[in-house]
Image (cartoon, grey):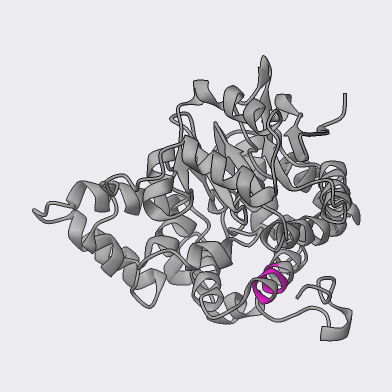
Amino acid sequence: MSDVVTEVKSNIGLITLNRPKTLNALSLSMVRDLTACLLAWRDNPQVLAVAVRGSHKEGVFGHFCAGGDIRFFHQAALAGDPSLEDFFTEEYTLNHLVHTYPKPYMAFMDGIVMGGGMGLSQGAAFRLVTERTQMAMPETHIGLFPDVGGGYFLSRLAGSCGEFLGLTGQVLSGEEAVAVGLADGHAASHRLPALWEGLGQQSWRDGAAALQWLRAQVDTQAPAAPAWLHADMHRIFALPSMVQMLDALGEMASVPHPQAPWAHATLDVLRQRSALMLCVVLHQIRLARGMGLSDDLRMERNMVRHCFHGRPIADCETVEGIRARVVDKDKQPRWKPARVEDVNAEEVASFFVPPWPDHAHPLRGLR
């Protein structure tokens, strides 16, 4: 069976990500199938709206999408496989299509929703989560940055929430996702099959009616803010540099303070990440705050090119991060440099220098 299963029922286009052994991690062929399907349905007047879900080993739902296929990234980078370039160009084009889709697009974000899964869902007209949702942009774990439009949607969150989530890779529950603005509604996971079937069984006058129906079936009230969403987090993650953030966290962790345990845990997380990529991500989110979606995606395409080609492959932070977490699984990445204090500002700036002239940029057509 295909890794992307599509059907139209009651004028609703239904998409199921069907690569459960990899938690629906996106391959290049999946990106191409999703793009072709959405383009066909966009131009088909018989399709009024679209819904997307994931599957797991025992059936549908359970997980949405764990991200891009990072094993492929590792293998392709080491082999010099040009399809790695195609993957990011086409994935970011798909992300743009989701954000700008002219028909209601509804994402059933059950289970794991990370990285590329966020790229398939954050542009949705309605983002539905459950008690099983585990949402994150965890790219700093592997020496990458929150891409797939991450700069755009993280930078739009209140206060310094985007910096905190992008730098730490903090995993959010479904309720936390609603609380911070990364989801629109919450439903118990056992209700998802009936909601999905309901979309495909009724007669809709237009896509807006289907969207309104789904919204009315679930809880859209904002829950209480999570414990980590406090004034000290906003203050520290608004500081100008990573060095200042780490110093402030260290100071808070070392004195009697209500947030000392949080500061200690957060400092420990950040010290495990690539020092270089932390500085890159901080700059990315702050630049993206002043950008539209298309410009952000073009910037991220520049950045990911630099991730894999800016250094010799033996010194690539992303290749090393994937090796340590997924390939060898020793969880001992050898970051270069090892400390934020030793990061070269010129190298950080180089991630944001376009490797192509404007007329040749692979995402020049995005508007």
Residue 161 percent location from the top left of the image = 39, 61
Give the quarter of the image for residue 199.
top right
Residue 60 percent location from the top left of the image = 67, 22
Q: In which quarter of the image is the C terminus?
A: bottom right
- Left or right: residue 207 versus residue 258 is right
The single residue placed furthest to the top in the displayed view is 58
At x 65%, y 53%, the residue is: 119
- Left or right: residue 150 versus residue 9 is left
At x 48%, y 67%, the residue is: 156
The single residue placed furthest to the left in the displayed view is 256
Say which of 261 and 40 sits in front. Answer: 40
Q: Quadrant of the N terminus?
A: top right
Residue 3 percent location from the top left of the image = 82, 32
Residue 173 visible in image: no
Range covered by the magenta-colored residues:
295-300
Q: In this view, does 118 lie above or below 1?
A: below
Magenta part, dominant SS: helix
Residue 24 percent location from the top left of the image = 71, 33
- Left or right: residue 229 versus residue 1 is left
Say which of 141 and 288 sits in front. Answer: 288
Please give the count of numbered marks on the rendered protein.
0
Say which of 348 and 29 sits in front. Answer: 29
Residue 184 visible in image: yes
